[in-house]
Image (cartoon, helix red, strand yellow):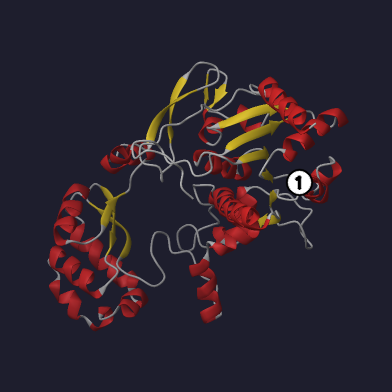
Amino acid sequence: MSTGASPDEPRLPLRDVRVVEFCQIAAGPFCGMLLADQGADVVKVEPPSGDGMRTWPPLTGADSENFASINRNKRSIVLDLKDPAQVGVALRLCDTADAVIENFRPGVMRRLGLGDEVLAARNPRLVRCSISAFGQQGPRSGEGGFDVTLQAIGGVMSVTGEPGGGPVKSGVPFTDFAAGLYAALAVVSALHEARRTGRGAAIDVPMLGTTLAVAALQTSEYFGTGRDPARLGSAHPRNAPYQAFRCADGHFVMAAGTDDLFRRACAWMGRADLADDPRFASTALRSAHQGALAAIVEDAVHARTVAACLDGLRAAGVPCAPINRYSEALADPQVGHYGWVQPLALPGGGRTRTFGDPLALNAPVRRRPPALGEHTQEILEELERWRTSRD
């Protein structure tokens, strides 16, 4: 689809799409923001108390930085969906939309009078996307869930952490964001089909399913061996040396995952003999003996600094990296090159920064995150004009 944008303007392929978002916290709002970043007019429907994430620290003034990070480029309307008259407003809003996303428990939208059948009958071209912990059907469909419970039930915590250690969740809530990514892809795909056929679709995004889907390497290991993958810390089950190593003043990561890279790493360490050691003669053998290999590597680098290790490995052409904190990751020159960190105004007048759309080169944030109900009157007036135009 051509956007008509000049080479110097951000490309907004969804600029003629309206999305109504009935979502709170993370997975659904992240999906909405991805669509908004691509130009969609995302109308966030909030209860009078607002999205629960509005209260999450850290706060700048009264504004949550967490909320701001996944709700830019949206408009906010407050509707009390326990009030039938305001449910009527929500229905009219959905009549004007191309897509609706929601992340209530299954059945809640139906009880509110906004069920899939009702929305589809009123607007046959509407794409309806539901994100939930376990999906709209099945024995667990009525259960709720959060990132940590999905990491637990989806197997993630069984492979996260050090060997022999207790259960550890991933530090990034990726089950929420993986679901949001899958949902955004599904919505865009369904919108394309709806424009071709005139028929919308109902999309069911179960977080358990998306969590297992992104664990393709772990599930395939189980299918192929019949054994559960185990915790390996920073190591890899099928590659070595491919992990974090301790040196004189900290840790660094080396990823010498091919025979050629292994030989280069050995030469850099001053242990060229390792390349001819029968224990390490192939990727599979290095993986099978990676405990012994890791001890050899750490013995070879124990007197070197992180900086020296990184400089030497880069010169040898071996992929490597420091263990960055987020302050360091965000200050990386590659982040600066793409302009990913952008200034962001907050509803209360404060200023902060945000990590922008990683796919849009220097595309500015078009709209700051909305204050609760900031656009209610504006959207109601639009709905009245839409109704009048149809009479």
210 or 11, which lies in front?
Answer: 11
**Which residue is under mark 1?**
123
- Against 10, residue 252 (above or below) is below
Where on the picture, by quarter, is residue 46?
A: top right
- Against 175, residue 92 (above or below) is above
Element carrying mark 1: loop
Where on the picture, by quarter, is residue 53?
A: top right
Query: Residue 23 location, x and y as percent?
Result: 67, 39
- Against 39, residue 157 (above or below) is below
Q: Tell whether 234 sits left or right of 181.
A: left
Query: Residue 320 location, x and y as percent?
Result: 26, 56
**Disc 1 residue type?**
Asn
Residue ranking furthest to the bottom: 278
31 or 55, which lies in front?
Answer: 31
Query: Residue 136 location, x and y as percent?
Result: 75, 56
Query: Residue 130 location, x and y as percent?
Result: 70, 50
- Against 229, residue 388 (above or below) is above
Structural crowding at the residue carrying mark 1, measured as other residues with C-alpha within 10 Å and reported as few (<14), some (14–19) or many (≥20): many
Q: Tell whether 76 sits left or right of 82.
A: left
Where on the picture, by quarter, is residue 347?
A: top right
User: Is any atom of residue 81 visible in this view?
Assistant: no
159 or 114, which lies in front?
Answer: 114
Q: Tell me what residue is drawn at x 85 percent, y 41 percent.
A: 113
Q: Check the picture and name the quadrant holding the C terminus.
A: top right
User: Is any atom of residue 236 visible in this view?
Assistant: yes
